[in-house]
Image: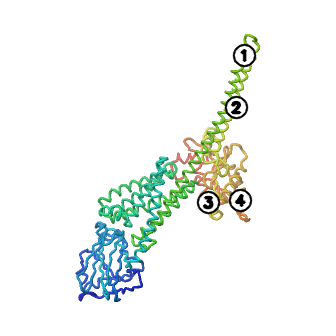
Amino acid sequence: MLCGSCVAIGTLPLSPNQEEYLLTPYIEYLEDPSNQLDLHDLLSPSSNELWQSNTESSETINFGYTSSTYWIRVDITNPNNTHDERYLEIAYAVLDHAILYLLTDDAAPEKITLGDKRPFHSRPLDHRNFIVPIKWQPNQTIGFYLQVTTSSSMQIPLTLWKTKRFIENTQRELLGLGIYYGTMLVMVLYNLFVFLSIRESNYLYYVCFVASSALFLASLNGISFQYLWPNATNWNDQAIIVFLLATLLFGALFTRDFLQLKSTKPLLEKLTNALCLLAILCIILTAVLPYSTMIITSIALAIVAIFTAISAGTMRWAEGDSSAKYYTIAWFSLMVGGIILAFNKLSLLPRNFITENATQIGSALEVILLSFALADRLNIEKKKRFEAQANSLELEKVARIAQSEALTQERNARQAQDKALEHEREAREAQASALGIQRRANETLERRVKERTNELEQVNKKLEDLSLTDGLTGIRNRRYLNRVLSSEFSRAYREKEPLGLLLIDIDHFKNFNDEYGHLIGDDCLRQVASTIRQQTHRNNDVVARYGGEEFCLLLPNTDQEGSLHIAEHVRQSVENIYFVVDDKAVRITISIGAISIIPQANAEPETLLEMADTALYRAKDNGRNQVIYYDATDTANEGTSEERNLLDPRHV
């Protein structure tokens, strides 16, 4: 070692040809839980047994969140007859306190104080990480003792650089950071202009989300401390938590409004509101609670928020919202990057280029994909407005034609009337003729107006019919089913007639979609819908798409026997479909839940659907490709006797 009382440790010899040394394999470390040890204590021979050799193969030693002080030591020698100058880099910008002691044989220890609790420009070199220039005399050995205390994650990545190599590496890092923050700035400015143009709150939430994400990563990487608040040491720690929580807050608000959770997923809407309130509360608590407590809480809350966003996006995607696919993939990208960063800070993953930059890569992908989602949503809304405008213009055109014809007829009538008045004195017959022409013109005008009115009524009827038809299969949709079910349920109750209902589900349709793709899956849905519709022979039977791969067949005035007969006929017809994919016949089967009841007083239409759904699940559990009739005995122990009476299909 460098002094008579010191115990020797391993020494790293410098080579003029090697421009970069990762010091992790060469160091020893010591944990000081009491935070009382000083350099004098550690230089005594009795302290040697306290040191431990580093066995990690990663780029850094990572002790996670701890209140202990850690000491790092290593000897580095210059065995050459020339001077050597290098940069020592501690590449973790959020360490609170770091003191570096340099020991040589012929001088007192040199003390260099570092850490983000000191003003930025007090550093030996203005850099977002902690950089210390070191000079070796020929054949000189320098002992390095590093003391670190921090409320952030205890990560100590140590690298020794030659000047040229350090500058090249810094330039590459700055290029990557420039590309990232440039992308974020472009997204903020572009979507801010869009918000100012259309005043849509989603764009404002998106802008705030992107800005908060960029500021969070800038605070974590030391960029904001270097360029935005170099003297605000207390705020520098809090900024990481505040901007992380702000990212969570605006991300939750964006999720709630973009996916329209209030109308589509009320429970998830309540959860996102709760996350917003928790984020605001945590922002307030950062002023009083320790950094280590708040950062772990914030990371946990962020993970919950990301999983909530992905779940909501996946459900909306499954429901057919095309914009939700971009949204879901975007949050999945951020989730992967965020989980990698969280595991890195909790010492579950090593610190390297991927773990340190995963969040930046994931957030950049997320921001771009969310922008695509907003653009897709805007295009969809534009298309809807365009179609509505086109329909309105068509109706307006028809009305104008009718008005023009009416004005023409009126002008002709007036001309005839004027002519008749001019010749009134000469010929009463001409006047009568003119009056006849005027009367006929008025009749023609009334007829034309009536015809146009009928045409408008037919157009409106077609529009209403389209709104009640499933666009993929051409059969009735869930909205129409709800309307007819309520009507038929009331009629069956008044007339004391049985009302049958079949709930049909295509077996293993998700696997079918995954194997053959959504286009073939759509063909399958259309084929099954057509086959079911062909089995109905009464005008009042209703075939509707219930949702996804589920269909519903409403059978007025049909008892249990009739419902089961029709259900089995439908099942066999679907099983006999000859469906060909890639010149290969694919077998399609369905499971059916059947029910027929005579509605009782105070019963609800949804009761019928719930019974059929229970029977359908029983058919799936029993092996699928079968018809199961609802058995009331399985629910006999649920509810009051009066409620069981209302649900019991044995009233048929």
Q: Which residue is mark 3?
A: 620
Q: Nearer the viewer, mark 3 or mark 1?
A: 1
Q: In x, y percent, where is residue 242?
A: 36, 59
User: Which mark sits nearer the N-terminus, 2 or 1?
Assistant: 1
Local crowd size for mark 1, using a 10 Å CA cut-off: few (<14), some (14–19), many (≥20): many
Please say if the residues under marks 2 and 3 sit with CB atoms less than 8 Å apart. Answer: no
Residue depicted at 66% across the width and 35% down the height: 398
The three-letter code of the residue at mark 2 reads: Glu
Would residue 147 be found to the left or right of residue 462 on screen? left
On the image, which quarter does residue 415 sit in? top right
Q: Nearer the viewer, mark 2 or mark 3?
A: 2
Q: Secondary structure at mark 4?
A: helix
Q: Which residue is mark 2?
A: 451
User: Which mark sits nearer the N-terminus, 4 or 3?
Assistant: 4
Work out whether residue 271 can be spotted.
Answer: no
Marks 2 and 1, Cα distance to the nearest angstrom? 30 Å
Q: Secondary structure at mark 2?
A: helix
Marks 2 and 4, Cα distance to the nearest angstrom? 49 Å
The three-letter code of the residue at mark 3 reads: Lys
Q: Which residue is mark 4?
A: 575
Marks 3 and 1, Cα distance to the nearest angstrom? 84 Å
Residue depicted at 56% across the width and 56% down the height: 317
